[in-house]
Amino acid sequence: MSAEQLVDHLERLEAAGEPSTKLVEALRVVRDPELLWRVADSVVAYPAIMGAIYQRASELRASEDTALGYLALSHTLSGDLEAASKILGQLPRSSSDPVVLSAWAALADDDAERVRRLEGGVSRRPDSLRLWRELATETLRAGQRERSREAHLWLLAHEQDSQQRERVAKIVEDNRWA
């Protein structure tokens, strides 16, 4: 089963209100963490789905930090900041996992703090497309045009996903940053 098919299947199960055991069962076709993380990046981040991804990651002995980061992000996106904070509180402050750093930034109270946290994440993981994408978006939203320009130009040089690259190129063009 492809990542796209699995994402669709998980979202249908969640929409039907299936128990978490069914979600975990559906993920048993995943044999390697790389596929699991592709699914986690693509699926709608419902806490039930991310909980199942966390359980499957544990079974695969995949990165617990990454799995907890996805789970924390799902709680943040669903508005349960307390649950997300509790999850992230279990992780070491020295974590350099991009998903954890992303989740921690998402919990910031304001744009400036979110940008500061993403800057810290990029300094820990200068190769993380996830963190650079978020930094580019957040600096643009916060009106930090020069930093946004730098982040978008970095992405233009390093982005591997053709759709993302086209999106970034359009932003660079629209802002006359090239």
Image (cartoon, helix red, strand yellow):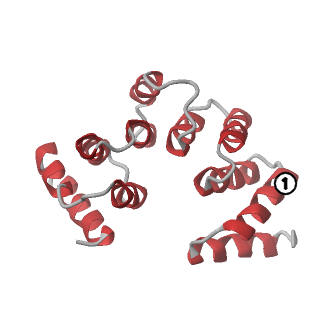
Residue 152 point in image, percent of width and height: 75, 62
Q: Is residue 121 left or right of residue 68?
A: right
- Disc 1 secondary structure class: helix
Horizontal and vertical percent position of residue 78 = 40, 41
Residue 160 in the image: above or below residue 31: below
Residue 90 or 58: which is nearer the viewer?
A: 58
Quarter of the picture containing the C terminus is: bottom right
Question: Where residue 122 appears, x then y in whole percent?
Answer: 69, 44
Along the horizontal axis of the image, is 172 left or right of 51?
A: right
Q: State the residue at coordinates (18%, 51%).
A: 23
Q: Quadrant of residue 4?
A: bottom left
Q: Quadrant of residue 79?
A: top left
Residue type (three-letter) at the residue carrying disc 1 = Arg
> Is 165 situated above or below 20?
below
Q: Residue at x 32, y 68 (%)?
A: 3
Where 49 sits versus 175, above or below?
A: above
Residue located beneath label 1 in the image: 145
Q: Quadrant of residue 81?
A: top left
x 82%, y 48%: residue: 144
Residue 117 image position (x, y, % from top left): 67, 35
